[in-house]
Amino acid sequence: LFVTRSNSNTFFTLAASITASSNNGHSHSKRPLPPPPPPSQFQPPPPPPPLQQQQRQQQQHQKQHQNEGYQNRRRLNENDKEDEMTAAAAAAALTLVLLLLASNLPVSQSATIPMPPQSSSHSSSLREELLGIIGRYPNGHLNDKIRDEFSAKLSQYSDCCPSDVDKSKDVIFAIGKSVFGVALNDGDVNGNSSSGDANANANANVDSNVDSNGSSNGSSNEPAAKKQKMNQETQTQTEIKTQTESKAEKEAPVIIDFEYMKQFMKDVFLTYGCTPEQAETSSEVLIEADKRGIDSHGLGRLKPIYCDRIDKGILWPNKPIHILKETETTALVDGNLGLGLYIGPYCMQLAIDKAKKYGVGFVACQNSTHYGIAGYYASMATDAGCVGFTGTNARPSIAPTFGVEPMLGTNPLVFGIPSSDEFPFIIDCATSINQRGKIEKYARDGVDTPKGAVIDVEGIERTDTEGILRDMVLGKCALTPLGGAGEATAGYKGYGWATVVELLCTAFQSGPFGEDICGVDRETGKPKPMPLGHFFLAINIESLCSLDTFEKNTGNLLKALRESKKSPLGPGRIWTAGEKENDARVFRTGEQGGMKVPGALQKNMIDLREAHPELKEKYAKFPFEE
């Protein structure tokens, strides 16, 4: 690839050359048409044959046409496949070029990107994987997981690449530094010593390259005006790069201590009129989500799901909880559209108390609101030596199998089971492929929604995250149940489980569902309350066997699952439910020392502070503003 920055037609020149090279000299858009049949002289039609002969001739003609049609379709399919391969190659090459152009790589006025040298099979494999990441994920540098994967592989490639590789000119290291922000602590990468600021070194390289080129060109009687123009362009590029890096640095996630973040969320709830007990419980549910790595249900929901809804008058921060009906083992509770983050823990604790006294406790709740991560309530039960079971309905998001209209909520079906492991077995997941909170996280990360998770009213599987969120509010998009749309991959199973949760959240409570809890008046477009239903079940283990025996039995089974034969194509490890969340909790509360707060959530925190004088006084400067 040949890059000439001063040429305004750079992109088009590159696109043309790449497309030509990817075609390998073949032009599929101008395939020669088959020659027309030779003209025949007119001859009078022969006399009609007998009826049986006519039928045989018709059958022969039909068969001949079918064979010709099959051969034509086969040729077209082969041509289409060839076109697809050509287009894929061109697209991958164009992606690479766009990344190079967008990254403002420190190259001279005219620079040639070198081809990779001969290397070992391992380094070649790593190089191919790195190029694969760049080609598959054009926006991968915006995704933490993809960026981390690229960084790890680039580090491995740096360690094992041949000694004759000039890392200051190798495109892989250039993209790693300028696009993915991965600057290895290796002097060879920047062409300088590893000491000092990497960006300053890169900029110094640009200046030194231009100066040396200028001297060389000057000795060749190059006009002084052209040299001055080159220096001005290089200076402009350096300034743009500095501004881009400064913006990226401001928007980069900042790690903040969990106690600080919990206190901030508690103060926000207090500002909105919650009691100290309500604020403490609500902030605890949210911060636990962030500790477990469930970022879609922690700080990310503070403003849009709770504060904004309080501001809109469809959720009330300080409402009393009423027990409408109660027996020794059951209760029906009314949350009066208060804060679900407080109503949920109240109901599960009521179920646990009944279970401890009578062996089992079941509580149904009506007129509640979003209650956070459902796994929190299953954990409450396991911490008390009980098996826990909970679920909630939500605004309509899932389309029934063979349907396109959102009718059911994402409706998690959640169990918690004590174990002798360091963590309980907690299965907390929606009955859809993705839930709305995950798509909101995709929007914050600036990435597309995976195909197959969303279907619109036309039956099309959508991936445009921002458009999906907009159309879901308008009822024009729906999530697909576990298993996907249709029955080919057993989508009816997820549809059935989502319906079970919806029934348990509405049948006991005579509660609304579907359009009545969508949160928007379809006629006026104004927000309206979403009275949700929940259910909570606790089973006291000691009522049936000793807790120690139960936990050992559970632990033995889970251990056997984790130690079973691994796939040779997998990560080399098998997890059981709740294990990954425990791993995240251990890492985030220990080694990481807090939670990552990305730019979008930093803005939410600033907006909340600026809207409330009490917060502005206490939080004059956040840690990411220092």
Image (cartoon, grey):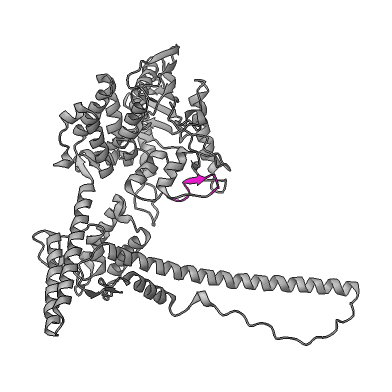
Answer with left or right where residue 218 lies relative to residue 310. Answer: left
Find the residue positioned furthest to the bottom: 41
Which quadrant of the structure image shows residue 206?
Answer: bottom left
Answer with left or right where residue 129 lies relative to residue 266. Answer: right
Q: Is residue 451 magenta?
A: yes
134 over 373 or under it: above or below = below
Q: Is residue 245 magenta?
A: no
Answer with left or right where residue 558 lies relative to residue 179. Answer: right
Query: What segment is highlighted magenta in the picture?
Result: 449-459
Q: Can you give x and y, in whole percent of width and height, for residue 303 in the image? A: 31, 33
Residue at the (85%, 71%) spot, across then down: 55
Residue at the (70%, 70%) spot, across then down: 66
204 over 412 or under it: above or below = below
- Name the dominant secondary structure of the magenta segment: loop
Residue at the (29%, 21%) spot, across then down: 278
Which quadrant of the structure image shows residue 413?
Answer: top left
Query: Which quadrant of the figure contains the N terminus?
Result: bottom left
Q: Choose between 557 and 58: the one closer to the eye.
A: 58
Q: Is residue 546 visible in this depiction of the protein?
A: no
Q: Choose between 410 and 6: the one closer to the eye.
A: 6
Q: Can you give x and y, in whole percent of width and height, for residue 361 in the image? A: 42, 19
Q: Is residue 238 visible in this depiction of the protein?
A: yes
Q: Can you give x and y, in whole percent of width and height, for residue 320 in the image? A: 36, 15
